[in-house]
Image (spheres, rainbow, N blue to C red):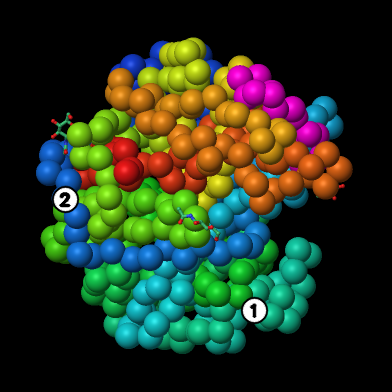
Amino acid sequence: MKLLQHLAVVLAAVVTALGADPPLPGWAFTNTMNGLSLKQPSKLSEASTMDSPTPRFSRLKHIKGPVNPASGLSLATRQVRAATEDTHPQNITAVGGFSTQYAIECTWDGLPVSLLFDTGSSDTWAITEDFECVGSLGNVVDQADCKFGSQFVNDFAHGEIEGTHFSLQYGSGEEVWGPMGYSDLSCGGLSVSKQQVGLANHTYWRGGNKVTVGILGMAYPSITSAFYGDLGDEASWNSKTYSPFLTTAIGQGTMEPLFSVAIMKNSSDGILAWGGLPPIPYNRCKNASADLLIANLIGEDDTASRSSFYTIVPDGMRWGSTTDEAKYPYIVDTGTTMMHLPPPLTEAIVRAFDPPATYMYQYGLYFVDCKSIPPLLAVIIAGVEFYIDSGDLVYHDIVDPMTGYCAVGFTNGGAGPYILGDVFLQNVVAVFDVGGAEMRFYERK
Ligand SMILES: *[C@@H]1O[C@H](CO)[C@@H](O)[C@H](O)[C@H]1NC(C)=O
Ligand SMILES: *[C@@H]1O[C@H](CO)[C@@H](O)[C@H](O)[C@H]1NC(C)=O
Ligand SMILES: *[C@@H]1O[C@H](CO)[C@@H](O)[C@H](O)[C@H]1NC(C)=O
Ligand SMILES: *[C@@H]1O[C@H](CO)[C@@H](O)[C@H](O)[C@H]1NC(C)=O
């Protein structure tokens, strides 16, 4: 039985990989994205041409803490770990320190809860009062060790779904499972009735921050993790795809099929807006759109481990007077603080700092004289240059005690995946037009 299950999973992975093959427009390179397959999702509607501010928005509260378990960074560090096990051991712990978690306030059947906002996973769940917190060896430990917030959700207002459970593992190894049912969920003025959700009664959780009690998953339905049958019977043939929060909201027809995100510079808090743009100043005329691609993990031997990322292929990068038009896919990820760039670009851009930045193995990051002048750096999307404020390229609060140098806002992404993290998202309004299968960007003022 186990062998058959494995075979089914491997076949599914091969089919996914083959299905991802059609050439993508404007993207002709031979590198794969290091364990990820790229797909163009189908359009549900024409891309919106009238982005306007919406009154429905939520604050995304920045939480210092461990790596968001489903962020692009979790995936990247895992790939690095796999690829460089004994050659160049990057300091994963140190890199992990520079990830970001965002909490969003929602109500769950009327109860206020704080959830981790996550664009890399699809399931929405919260912990129940008597949940089992387990350690790395599967041993039951004190609930406090999982470091969740203190609000529990104990049942589903619209009932449990018999014979169905959710079970998932995140990029960083955390796992969670429990029953599923229907609840009313409302976040930032967007209400969804009878949403299929999970209540976690068992979890191995290192991503705790003592604030959030679960996850609001914003990715596509293809990676939802509901299964028929008993716990432990998870396999691709008994998985049961369902409509996650965002898809249900779109289906209930109460908003344009998109959401947008802007990360604030100072506080690192963010704003999430439903169906339009957040009410912040932006330059309407400096905008660009790019095909929305979905990067899925491939070759996973465990169906319960799924991640999927909103990804684009920019035209290239510009720094100083140099333009590089090599095409690489980049995950657009609020859960990753820095940008993770391809090695040749990283090397060239760090040399363009005056004085240049140097790599510090012990952190897996670049550091530079805190007074160094960064090059003017832009990500080029559909011919439009989106400049990154030079103040965002040197972290004055991440200082190496030995040299007194400051960390640089991007790092070497190795063989991938490459990531446009918060450093980029602090300079734009990013529109995830899920309906139109497009991403749009506006320059911030
Ligand atoms: C957790 O939920 C699963 C799935 O519904 C169920 O089989 C299991 O008995 C529950 N465990 C506890 C400790 O409640
Ligand atoms: C950012 O915060 C610092 C210190 O908290 C403050 O001095 C500075 O004025 C703030 N900058 C902006 C643009 O709000
Ligand atoms: C994007 O910019 C172009 C050129 O400046 C402008 O004509 C267009 O109206 C802008 N699009 C939106 C949706 O604002
Ligand atoms: C990793 O980084 C941490 C924190 O900067 C440091 O204490 C540790 O010694 C580093 N480990 C290695 C193997 O370089």
Q: How many marks?
A: 2
Direction from residue 255 to residue 210 in the image, left or right: right
For the C terminus, the quadrant is: top left
For the residues marked 1 and 2, what is the alpha-carbon distance in whole angstroms? 45 Å
Is any part of residue 79 visible from this angle?
Answer: no
Say which amino acid is labelled 2.
Answer: Ser
User: Is 102 colored magenta in this rendering?
Assistant: no
Badge 2 marks a residue whose secondary structure is loop
Task: Name the main secondary structure of what is drawn in magenta.
Answer: loop
Cβ of mark 2 under 8 A from ligand 3: no
Classify 10 Å Cα crowding around label 1: few (below 14), some (14-19), many (20 and above).
Answer: some
Cβ of mark 1 under 8 A from ligand 1: yes
Q: Which mark is residue 132?
A: 1
- Residue located 37% across and 51% down the image: 262
Which span of residues is magenta-colored?
A: 351-364
The residue furthest right is: 402
User: Is 361 colored magenta in this rendering?
Assistant: yes
**Image-quadrant location for residue 406:** top right
**Image-quadrant location for residue 368:** top right
Residue 17 % position (x, y): 46, 29
Which residue is the site of mark 2?
52
Q: Nearer the viewer, residue 412 or 129?
A: 412
- Residue located 54% across and 24% down the image: 375
Q: Nearer the viewer, residue 444 or 332?
A: 444
**Is label 1 or label 2 in front?**
2
Residue 92 % position (x, y): 74, 44
Q: Nearer the viewer, residue 376 or 25?
A: 376
Say which amino acid is labelled 1.
Answer: Glu
